[in-house]
Image (tube, rainbow, N blue to C red):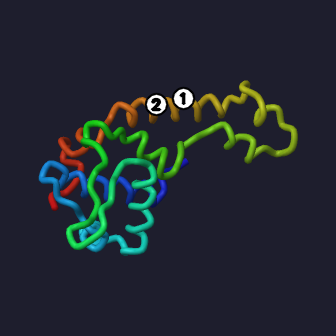
Amino acid sequence: MKFNTQEEYGLRCLLRIAQFYEMEKTLTIPEISRGEGISEHVTAKILRALRLGGFIESARGHLGGYTLARPPKDILIGSVLKELGGKLYDESFCTSHSKGDLLCTITSDCTVRSLWVLIQNSVDTVLDGMNLSDMMKKNIILSA
């Protein structure tokens, strides 16, 4: 169980775009890429996922670029991470790691499963209670 690079980069790109939301300024792929130290190819891929997830909007043309689809306070960090990579733990984890017909891997009596569920519920509580605006206020991001 760990966060992947797409989730890390996705949050960083989203936070960078959010810094300019109030100014109604759009950012281009090269600007975001340079600011975050991520290749343009990877940045474009992540921005596509964020756009398809409904977190950002894009505009073409000379003055085009990316902006948030809604205010930072309305974008939950848990939703972003789920869109970019899924959950840390889901039920399919146990079935994909079963060793034959061991009872532990296919029933709710599994002692390890209860730990993973507890951890996932705790993570969900924190991430679903935090929005993009909260992260911006806590100075989690560096200034542009």
- SS assignment at label 1: helix
Pointer 2 residue = 122
Q: Is residue 38 above or below residue 126?
A: below
* Amino acid type, residue under disc 2 in the picture: Ser
Q: Is residue 39 left or right of residue 95?
A: left
Residue 102: x and y in percent read 84, 37
Report the residue that reaches farthest toward the top.
Answer: 109
Q: Give the quadrant of residue 101.
A: top right
Q: Is residue 34 above or below residue 19?
A: below
- SS assignment at label 2: helix
Q: Which quadrant would the C terminus be assigned to in this image?
A: bottom left
* Residue at image point 29% right, 60% down: 66
The crowding category of the residue bearing disc 1, from other C-alpha atoms within 10 Å (few below 14, some 14 to 19, many at least 20), is: few
Determine whether label 1 and label 2 are within 8 Å by CB: yes
Report the residue that reaches farthest toward the right.
Answer: 101
Residue 49: x and y in percent read 45, 57
* Residue at image point 33% right, 55% down: 57
Rounded to the nearest angstrom, the CA distance separating label 1 from label 2 is 6 Å
Q: Is residue 78 left or right of residue 71?
A: right
* Amino acid type, residue under disc 1 in the picture: Leu
Q: Give the quadrant of residue 111.
A: top right
Q: Is residue 134 left or right of residue 23?
A: right
Q: Nearer the viewer, residue 52 or 126?
A: 52
Pointer 1 residue = 118
Residue 36: x and y in percent read 28, 66
Q: Nearer the viewer, residue 84 or 37?
A: 84
* Circle number at residue 88: none
* Residue at image point 62% right, 28% down: 114
